[in-house]
Amino acid sequence: RKEVEQDPGPFNVPEGATVAFNCTYSNSASQSFFWYRQDCRKEPKLLMSVYSSGNEDGRFTAQLNRASQYISLLIRDSKLSDSATYLCVVIGGSGNTGKLIFGQGTTLQVKP
Amino acid sequence: ETGVTQSPTHLIKTRGQQVTLRCSSQSGHNTVSWYQQALGQGPQFIFQYYREEENGRGNFPPRFSGLQFPNYSSELNVNALELDDSALYLCASSLGAGLNEQFFGPGTRLTVL
C-alpha cells in the first residue's frame, strides 16, 4: 500500500464548478499535511497547509481527519488557471528529517 | 521564484553512464532535499542534507549519492544509470531539517537511453 494515496483523475470540470479532491495516508504518526500544486513540467509549489480545524484560503478549503487519516481539498468557483496537478503531501511520522511524502497527484482540467 | 536553482535543465545520458546534478539553495537555507519524479507520479524522496551531513535517505540504491558543500549547495550523483532513472530530479531547500517549508527548484529532466 502506498503511504499517500490519491485518485489520479483527471477531473474535467467547467469554469465555476466546485471540485473536491481526497487523499488518504497510512502512517498514523504523520505530523504535518499539505497540498501542493504542480503545473505541467514545472516544480511543485506549496498551495496550503492542512490543519485539523480546517482552513480556508480564498476559494480553497482544506480539511484533515486524523481519525480516518483522510485529507481533502475543496476548490470553489473553479477558474481556468486552476488547471494543474494537485499533490497531497505528508511529512513522515518519525525522526526529524522533514521528508515529504507525496501522493501520485490529481489532475484538474477546468474548461471554458 | 523560490531562489533555488538547478543545473543542468535537461540532460541525456546512456545506460551505464554516470551523472552529476547540482542545486543551489535559497539564501539562508542550510538544508537540501532531493526528490525523483517519474512521469505521472508524485516526487519520491531520495535523501536530505543538513549542514553538510546526510540526514535521512529514502528507498534508493547506493548508486544514488550526494554531497553538500559549506555554502549549502548540493550535488546528486547517480552511477551506472538505468533506463528507469529517467525522471525529473527536484531539489528543495529549507531552513532546518524538520517541518519547515521546503522550496523547490525548477528541476533537472534526465533522460537515459
Image (tube, coloured by chain):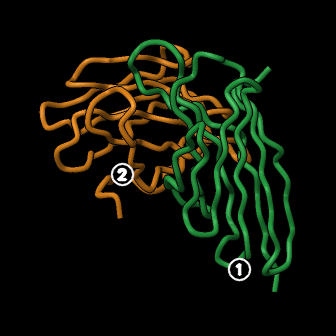
**Left or right: where B51 falls relative to A27:** left
Q: In terms of secondary structure, where does tag 2 sit?
A: strand
Instruction: Tell me, by letter, which chain the rendering colours orange.
Output: B
Residue plotted at (53% across, 22% down): A92
Q: Residues within 10 Å of mark 1 (few under 14, many from 20)?
A: some
Taking the view exactly as shown, the residue that stands out farthest to the front is A53
The answer to whether B7 appears left or right of A55 in the picture is: left
Q: Quadrant of the C terminus of chain B?
A: top right
Where the N terminus of chain B falls, by quadrant?
Answer: bottom left
Quarter of the image where one finds residue B9: bottom left
Q: Mark 2 or 1, which is nearer the eye? A: 1
In the rendered structure, which amino acid carries the disc numbered 1? Leu
Cα gap from disc 2 to disc 1, whole angstroms: 31 Å
A34 to A5, vertically: above or below: below
Figure check: A57 above or below A29: below
Residue of label 2? B7
Which chain is disc 2 placed on? B
Q: Which quarter of the picture shows residue B41?
A: top right
Residue B112, visible in the rendered structure: no
Give how far across and how far down residue B93 sits, in percent: 33, 41
| Residue indicated by mark 1 | A80
